[in-house]
Structures are given as C-alpha cells and as structure tokens.
C-alpha cells in the first residue's frame, strides 16, 4: 500500500473515526495483560514517536479501512494525563498485525510529515516487567537507514526468541543516532548473537555488539527508550589520523575528545567511556563540538585512548588526546 492510499483512507475515515474511537476506548484491555502462549497470540503492535496531538481517534482513522483493528490505546502519564508519545494497536490476528507492520512501517502518517514507527509490542499495556525475563544487546555503528523492523528481522531470522528491536533516534530531528537495542527471550541465543552477529552487515554497515545494561523500568518498550548500554569501542578506525602523542605526566587521567557529534549527550559519552574504568566526570562544553573525560586511574585512560581514538561515535569520527580540564584551549 502506498502513502497516497493511506492519505485517502485517512480522509475518508476521519468523519467516522470519533465514534469508532469511543467504542474502542471502552474495549476491554485484558488481552494486553496476558503473556502470549503462541505466535498467533502476538497480534498487538507498538506505535511510537507520536506527536502530542495524536489520539486514539486519529490512529483509528489510519487503520480502520483494513477492517482488522480490535482496539487502540494511546498511553498517557498517570499524573499529568498527557500522552507519553506511544501507544498500541491490536489486530484480529498475528498475520494481520504482521501485514500492517511490513506495509506501514516507515511510510508517511496521513496529514503529517512524520513516518509510522511500528514494532511488535512485547508486553501488554501497562504491564509490569518481570525480573530476568529479557536479555538485551547493544548494537552500534548502524547505518542511517536502519529501522526498528530491519534491525529486528536481521536478528530474528537467526534467533527465534527475538522479541523486538529499537533504533535510538534524536528526539528533535528524528534521525538515527547510529545505535540501538535488540531484546531476546532466551539468554543463550542472546549470548550467541553477541559473538555470531558482531561484524555482520545490517544494511550497509557491519554491526558492533556488546551487552546492554538496561535500567529498571515499567511499561512496554521503556527499556529501549531509557536503557543505557556498555557501549563497544566504535568501528571505522581512520588510519589517516595521527597517533596520540604520549603524555609524560603519569598523574594525568583526563582525555580530550575532539570532533564530537553534536547529537551525543554527556550521559552517552559517560556510558561509552565507563566500560574502560571508573570515571571522575564526562563533560561536553556547550557549542564546542568536543568533550572531556577524566578517569580515576591512568591505565583506564590509556586503554580508552587506544581503543576509541579514530573511531566513530554517533555519526562522526573522533580524535582523542591527553587533556587537562574542560577549560583547556584544545581545538575541537
């Protein structure tokens, strides 16, 4: 189905969507709370990155013409009542949901400049996560055109227990940050994937994989939106970059990170370098396109320089050198 067909279907269904949505709102949500017993039970899609004005009525108008929608729910903050930016669409069957996922994902949403962002809903709406039920990996160096669905299917063909995938995007531009997460139900498959899929191409780039370290959260898909990973040393070493000059001050544990992607946050910088040892801080001076990272141990700083210098963080190749402090006059 093409984008113009979606526009036509939306326009035709808009006049009746309010009544349909009202009926949808009263539909029981018990099915969302049940763990699936078979693949046929998995028939709910997660829809994310929704604008603040998107409601159940609008989503119903997008899918109503298929005749296969069972219920729609936009998730709202329990305190403020404001939408959380994601929701769920339940279909009559797994086949129907899969058909919508493959057809709509990445297409333009009717009446907007935004595209559909769809994935399988791994847990029911509002359901609390059980401890130890998921096993996630971090996937870095993703090409800009990699979507949630492509990342998921790249792994699912090899590992049946894959429950979903999430490509992290910049909230302002909607562009991929070049990394994401894949979630497994089976720990053994997760462990195999970390070895077997490292360096395998997804779209036009080889993936770089390590274990993810999710925060404890509740609700569907939140693991992906809030999780932080132990980032692997990024790929794409640039041979043309000169080696880092030695520093004779053995007490210096500060690293200067130049050429930093402006979309990389301090928290992400901290997570990336934390795998090499305990940090004192990670700072990104405003508007300078660079950062500073200080370790508690010299050996940690040396390893970080050796592994990260000339690699890609976000969408840019970084150059590392010994630094002194965020006030240093080093050229970014």
Image (cartoon, rainbow, N blue to C red):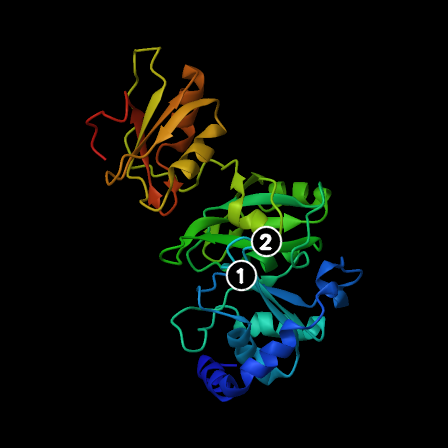
Q: Is residue 20 left or right of residue 180?
A: right
Give the mark nearest the N terminus, 2 or 1.
1
The CA span between labels 2 and 1 is 9 Å
Furthest toward the right, the residue is: 37
Q: Which residue is mark 1?
A: 86
Query: In the image, which disc is placed on residue 191?
Result: none
Dot 1: element? strand
Residue at horizontal 54 percent and vertical 76 percent from the top: 57
Quarter assignment of residue 36: bottom right
Residue 194 visible at all: yes
Residue identified by numbered label 2:
221
Foreground tag (2 vs 1):
1
Q: Give the number of marks.
A: 2
Mark 1 surroundings within 10 Å by alpha-carbon count, few (fewer than 14), some (14 through 19), many (20 or more): many
- Where in the figure is residue 187, as x and y percent of width and height? 71, 42
In the depicted structure, whether residue 242 falls above or below residue 157: above
Q: Quick one: 153 or 120, which is closer to the camera?
A: 120
- Residue 25 rendering spot, x and y as whole percentages: 63, 72
Nearer the observer, 162 or 201: 162
Which one is nearer the viewer's eye here, 78 or 305?
78
Residue 159 as seen in the image, left or right of residue 12: right
Assign a secondary structure to mark 2.
loop
Is residue 192 found left or right of 9 in the rendered image? right
Residue at the spot 41% in from the left edge and 15% down from the top edge: 298
Report x, y in % for residue 161: 71, 53
Crowding at dot 2, Cα within 10 Å, few <14 / some 14-19 / many 20+, comes out as: many
Note whether residue 198 is visible.
Answer: no
Whether tag 2 and tag 1 are in contact, CB under 8 A, the answer is: yes
Q: Height in image: 267 above or below 88?
A: above
């Amino acid at each position: 189905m093409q984008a113009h067909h979606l526009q036509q279907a939306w326009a035709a269904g808009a006049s009746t969507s309010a009544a349909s949505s009202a009926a949808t709102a009263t539909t029981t949500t018990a099915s969302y709370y049940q763990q699936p017993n078979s693949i046929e039970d998995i028939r709910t899609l997660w829809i994310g990155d929704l604008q603040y004005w998107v409601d159940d009525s609008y989503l119903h108008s997008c899918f109503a013409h298929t005749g296969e929608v069972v219920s729609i729910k936009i998730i709202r903050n329990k305190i403020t009542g404001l939408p959380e930016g994601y929701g769920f669409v339940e279909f009559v069957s797994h086949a129907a949901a899969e058909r919508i996922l493959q057809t709509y994902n990445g297409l333009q949403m009717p009446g907007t400049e935004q595209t559909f962002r769809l994935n399988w809903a791994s847990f029911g709406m509002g359901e609390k996560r059980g401890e130890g039920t998921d096993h996630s990996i971090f996937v870095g160096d993703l090409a800009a055109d990699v979507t949630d669905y492509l990342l998921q299917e790249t792994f699912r063909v090899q590992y049946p227990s894959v429950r979903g995938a999430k490509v992290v995007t910049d909230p302002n531009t909607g562009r991929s940050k070049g990394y994401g997460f894949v979630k497994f139900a089976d720990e053994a498959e997760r462990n195999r994937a970390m070895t077997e899929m490292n360096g395998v191409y997804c779209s036009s780039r080889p993936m770089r994989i390590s274990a993810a370290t999710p925060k404890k959260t509740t609700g569907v898909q939140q693991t992906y939106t809030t999780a932080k990973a132990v980032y692997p040393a990024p790929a794409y070493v640039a041979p043309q970059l000169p080696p880092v000059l030695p520093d004779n001050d053995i007490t210096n544990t500060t690293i200067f990170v130049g050429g930093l992607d402006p979309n990389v946050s301090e928290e992400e910088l901290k997570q990336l370098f934390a795998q090499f040892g305990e940090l004192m801080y990670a700072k990104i001076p405003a508007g300078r396109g660079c950062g500073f990272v200080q370790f508690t141990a010299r050996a940690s700083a040396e390893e970080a320089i050796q592994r990260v210098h000339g690699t890609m963080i976000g969408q840019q190749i970084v150059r590392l050198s010994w630094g002194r402090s965020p006030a240093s006059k080093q050229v970014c």
